[in-house]
Amino acid sequence: MKQFNDITIIGIDQGYGNMKTANTIFPTAITAYDTAPMFKGDVLEYGGRFYRMGEGHKGFVADKSADGDFYLLTLAAIAKELEQYRLFTANLCLAVGLPLSWVGSQRESFRQYLMQNETVSFRFNGNPFQLRIISCKVYPQGYAAIVQQLADFEGEHLLADIGNGTMNLLYLTDSQPQENRCWTEKIGVNQCMIRAKEAVLRRFGSKISDSTVEQILRTGTAKIDVDYLACIREVAASYAAELFAALRSYEYDPATTHLTIVGGGGQLVKHFGSYDPEQVTIVDDICAAAKGYEYMAYRQMLRG
């Protein structure tokens, strides 16, 4: 969160796997209830209904503004960030992002979607929030995660933002983004999750939870049977090789181009990929994009 006069800037990285603010993260999942849920924790009360965040599974949607859930998830993300500062009323500027090659076509519809209510009242975890959304700024996803380190991007760089649903690619030359060399591929980490679960089911006849597979992809290991672990690691290594093959199809050459990976997929590459660490940088901060959105919005406001 950043403050500009009486305006509170909140950056939100609305990923297909996780919702991130500068200081919080929770799974991009939501379950609706007609009455208050039995157990407490991350419950949004809005419009006469109750919604538990992080429960269930949210599928991939190409246009988030056509899906009502992302508005509710955004309200929860705002509340979780404001809770860090014990704030329950605010004039807000939302700073968000879209995949690189979708920004031009979806920016305005997404901005209007998030600003559908200028004033909004709801309760989150029992706390009442009264908010006024006065503006919404939409930036290129991925690029925001490295915008504060652009001075380090000398020479030829390829930025790969590997999320749960998509992989966004952008070339930079001497810190300057090359707008005609950016692409979005639907080759996110969720595809690896699906393959890993299918491999375990085929080989052992057992189902394995998303959370266990996610832990292995994020950390490289988990406390499960060694044969199950080996099976999932094989799938992850194969998927990491596919990622690099996809990069090469977009003219990536590790001999001439430094690769920077942001997003949750960076941990998968770190643990299962084969690469030269001198030529590849993996940004570990999963909230880097949300922080970058705030930085870009703040700088834009300073410029008037």
Image (spheres, helix red, strand yellow):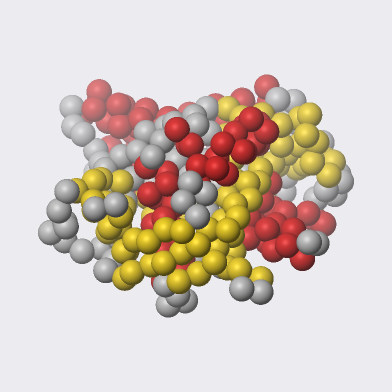
Which quadrant of the figure contains the C terminus?
bottom right
* Residue name at image x 18 percent, y 32 percent: 206
- Residue 3 seen in the figure: no
* Residue name at image x 80 percent, y 36 percent: 178
Please state which of residues 175 and 42 is positioned toward the viewer in this rendering: 42
Q: Where in the figure is residue 168, as x and y percent of width and height?
A: 62, 35
Q: Quadrant of residue 9?
A: bottom right
Please state which of residues 235 and 127 is positioned toward the viewer in this rendering: 127
Viewed as shown, does residue 259 lie left or right of 58?
right
Which quadrant of the figure contains the N terminus?
bottom right
Q: Where in the figure is residue 158, as x and y percent of width and height?
A: 73, 39
Q: Where in the figure is residue 46, as x and y percent of width and height?
A: 30, 55
Q: Quadrant of residue 134?
A: bottom right
* Residue name at image x 25 percent, y 23 percent: 202
- Residue 304 seen in the figure: yes
Viewed as shown, does residue 198 lie left or right of 67?
left
Q: Quadrant of residue 280?
A: top right
171 vs 122: above or below: above
Viewed as shown, does residue 296 lie left or right of 177?
left
Count of numbered circles on the image: 0
205 vs 222: above or below: above
